[in-house]
Image (spheres, rainbow, N blue to C red):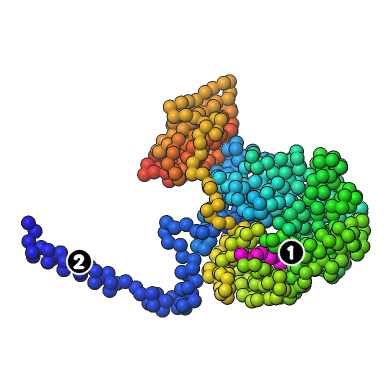
Amino acid sequence: MVSNSVIKGAACLAVGVLLAATASAQSLQEVMKARKLTDRDILAAAKTYTPTGKHDEFVVFSSGGQSGQVIVYGVPSMRIIKYIGVFTPEPWQGYGMGDDESKAVLAGGRVGGRKIDWGDSHHPALSETNGDYDGQFLFINDKANPRIAVIDLKTFQTVQIVANPILKADHGGAFVTTNTEWVLEAATYAAPLDGKFYPLDQYDAKYRGAITFWKFDRAKGRIDPARSFSLELPPYWQDLVDAGKLDSEGWVFINSFNSERYRGGYGKGNHGTFQDQLPFEAGVSQRDTDYLHVINRKAVEALYSQGKYTKINNHPVISIAELVAANALFLVPEPKSPHGADVTPDGKYITVSGKLDTHTSVYDFAKIKALIDRKDFAGKDPYGIPILDMKKALHGQVELGLGPLHTQYDSAKGIAYTSLFVDSAVARWDYINLKLIEKIPVHYNIGHLMTAEGDTVSPKGRYLVALNKMALDRFTPVGPLHPQNHQLIDITAGRPMQVIYDMPLPLGEPHYAVMIKADKLKPIFRFTRSDFKDNTAPGTARVERKGKVVTIHMTAIRSHYDPEIIEVKAGDDIVWHITNLERAQDEVHGFTVDTYNVNASLEPGKTSTFRFKADRAGVFPFYCTEFCSALHLEMMGYLLVKP
């Protein structure tokens, strides 16, 4: 029996520990005082804090700019979750680092047979069903080398890259139609579509814009180039794209600038007659308006199915003349130097902001359609395309501020948000009643913005992210090159907007992003071994020789490879299949061989294949590059290359 004295002693000890803990605990007020925080700061922290083990309500897919990748982070925590290798090799995931599978994906993105080592990823687009995100696929463009990539959101891995056969730049990609029948990619800078040389004095005759309709095969999860086509467009510089929805279903809208068809020539160092001209920035901004392109998608699909196209670089292109004859292409004047033709959730309106205008213009699709049906045109452009009267097509204009750019929408009816680059602000406004509600400063020089599912038929509201181009004083200095600043803003209905988080992004210049409800994403946790034709089953590891080709069938499991000692001859061609036999979630193995420039990430169930020539005699250790177990360092082997 325990004595009373022992019980009393234990009780006294417990009370002493509790008192000591209480005495050492720091109160919220003390933390606020020590860190000089305000009540507003604490409220912002509470709105974004996500306790350990809890998940975010939303997931953001952001372009990675010059990194050529996609950045994935959560909202409201703003925690970075993943980088997805897309147009550029990504070492941690072994993407493009020697394995057959990712090398084949990157090879699909060769341009004119030329290997491209980087990409300028710009506009991600999520697959849609009936105008809502469905969480199945992500598409993104490479502006520098016109390409579109497909990312399978079951694995968060890039599965396809297709190179555009006729474009030279594609700021207007990627965008999707409401059931992801088509992935849309529009040109930016006009150029000869056949890729041949023509002097700039033939600009009007030989240079063209275009938009490509990439056919997406959802069952295969791939773009089908054989069922894809493009539209020839005038040599204006097409910009961003949006597909109609609900009331405007079956139509496509594209901004453009440089309706002047200006050709440049600033300074004395230019070729020939192109000297001492206005710089492009001034020359392409001389007119008061540019052109919103309005395309009847059903009509262009019919033209394609009827074979009314010519092939350029073995790719079907429907001419301007065919488009005009089929009543498929129209122009509407829009504020000059626009950036974004953004269809409202109900499809009734298209909002357009001209960067050199303080207004955002709201076009009424019903009015546009009525003008087209009546053939009520104000004239034609030099290429014979009907032009609608701007005033007759407008619902109205709202003065928002300096440098309006991109608009997305709220769950509250009629509420929109527009980025103001020059003002460094976000405007909340009513596009139905045409009035500004409020503005909030951001830091600094915002480009795009996004709201939760804000370009779908059913935006979710609550959160907005400002993709700011300059950080300046927001973060600890790290030299002349600053990170980008993604600022999270609380846009809860009925309350003033509030900036609640600054997130530095030091990977490229993230140009645009999309935000989806996290519960719509259904990723797998492990691969199925049988999905890989060269998988190695447990107990079947072996080395096979056929002439000078040595095929290694290897398995990996905590904490060893099988086989561990492999002997080949100098000059042998090596084919190395490695299968991760783990079934436990997150039990990833890595693989690299000294000197041979290969690197793999082997998620559970995955098989990767490497091919290289054992080009010199020597001893080459290989090992697991992931800290997979307590005996991680022991997970290694030797490739012995005999003379």
Rendered image quadrant of residue 437: bottom right
The residue shown at (62%, 75%) is 440
Label 2 secondary element:
helix
533, 278: nearer the viewer: 533
Which residue is label 2 attached to?
Answer: 14
Q: Main secondary structure of the magenta part?
A: strand
Question: Which amino acid does the dot numbered 1 rest on?
Answer: Tyr
> How far apart are labels 1 and 2 at the CA level?
68 Å
Percent from the top left, x then y, of residue 554?
Answer: 48, 31
443, 256: nearer the viewer: 256
Rendered image quadrant of residue 278: bottom right
Q: Which residues, given as a range, are shown in magenta?
A: 405-411
The residue shown at (56%, 66%) is 462
* Residue 199 visible in the displayed image: no
| Residue 339, placed above or below residue 534 | below
The residue shown at (51%, 44%) is 524
| Residue 262, placed above or below residue 307 | below
Q: Do labels 1 and 2 touch, CB within 8 Å?
A: no
* Residue 452 visible in the displayed image: yes
User: Which tag, 1 or 2, sits closer to the chain's start?
Assistant: 2
Percent from the top left, x then y, of residue 335?
Answer: 80, 68
1 vs 2, front mark: 1
Q: Is residue 562 magenta?
A: no
Q: Is residue 406 magenta?
A: yes
Question: Which amino acid does the dot numbered 2 rest on?
Answer: Ala
Which residue is label 1 attached to?
Answer: 349
Percent from the top left, x then y, of residue 592?
Answer: 51, 40
Residue 616, numbered circle? none
